[in-house]
Amino acid sequence: MRINFRCNGILPLLFSFLLLFTAGCGGKLPQQQKSSGTAEKGKPTVVSLAPSLTEMIYAIGAGKQLVGRTTACDWPKEAASVPLVGAFAEPSLEVLAAIHPDLVIDVDLSEKETGNKIAALGIRRETIQCRTPDDIPPALRKLGRLTGHAREADSLALLISNGLAGFRQKTAEEKNRKKVYLEIWDDPFWTGGKGSYTSALIAYAGGYNIGDAVEKEYFQISQEWVIEQNPDIIACMYMSKNSSAVDNVMKRQGWSHISAVKQNRVYDRFDNNIFLRPGPRVLEGIKQLSDLIHRDEKHAP
């Protein structure tokens, strides 16, 4: 069995890659970027440096205030018309200076010094992190206060809080939960460990994340480790270029003895954005996982 615990510094790079991969964006910026100037009167103009924050901004009705985004911010579709300011967590200071928004919001920055440079430009910066689904409602409320959409944000936050409570109640009495292996990437193999956002989604959906055996958020694993864990369900959170991810899993040497493979419980073609981005669509992601985990029960006589 081999597990690679060297995840410090790797996780931001991994997710930057995943976000760019799922968005299908390049890293180049147009030579000129101009603010749309459509923000509501009296409300701050905003630049988002993370796709999860961009989704939240639109979800609370503050989309018109968004005057800058990253190459990874690809949802909702309206975001495509917003000027680019750089890559995920890596803004161009020159572009920020030109746009000069009232507020820059990020989840983290690749270079800590960048935050000081943003402040030196006279631009307010706020960091809003979501590591679990439970962090999403307070994040929405904070965004609501920052953008002047507190009422809309509070309503959405309450809706999500109630939805999460419903899933908790539904799964509290479940016994013998299905073991789930969520394959984030296959070259090399990566999955989410205990305390990861993806692990929390699986728990809310009524499953048991096999990665919970490891006290790391995200980590690299070997095929032997997955075989030893013998998951009941395998969910591939990526698209294979030349063939389906499911076909590749089913053909892997030694995997024919895994319960998920024997029972044809291997799945792919997920919308990665829903499952890897902590955002307003969290209940949709949990519902999809719950339906998948309990699929056999629904078809039982």
Image (tube, helix red, strand yellow):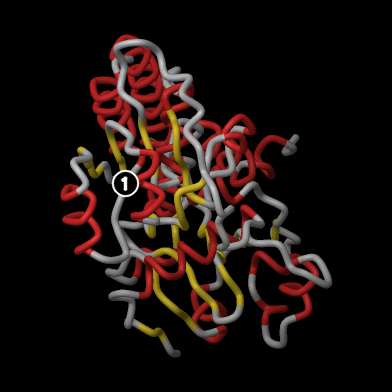
Where does residue 294 sit, x and y in percent of width and height? Answer: 61, 42
Q: Nearer the viewer, residue 215 or 187?
A: 187
**Would you place residue 94 above or below residue 68 in this image?**
below
Q: The N terminus is located in which quarter?
A: bottom left
Number of numbered callouts drawn: 1
Where does residue 100 sit, x and y in percent of width and height? Answer: 32, 38
Where does residue 183 sit, x and y in percent of width and height? Answer: 56, 66
- The residue sitting at 72% across, 78% down in the picture is 256
The image quadrant of residue 146 is: top left
- The residue sitting at 16% across, 50% down in the picture is 120
In the drawing, does residue 139 fall left or right of residue 263? left
The image quadrant of residue 27 is: bottom right
Where does residue 2 sit, x and y in percent of width and height? Answer: 43, 89
- The residue sitting at 71% across, 68% down in the picture is 261
**Would you place residue 115 above or below residue 165 in this image?**
below
- Pointer 1 residue: 106
The amino acid pointed to by label 1 is Asp
- The residue sitting at 58% across, 38% down in the picture is 75
Q: Nearer the viewer, residue 241 or 261?
A: 241
In the drawing, does residue 151 fall left or right of residue 69? left
Mark 1 falls on what kind of element? Answer: strand
Q: The C terminus is located in which quarter?
A: top right
Residues packed near mark 1 inside 10 Å, few (<14), some (14 to 19) or many (20 plus): many
In the drawing, does residue 189 fall left or right of residue 220? right
**Would you place residue 203 above or below residue 236 in this image?**
above
- Considering every residue shown, the one lying at the far right of the view is 243
Q: Nearer the viewer, residue 19 or 111?
A: 111
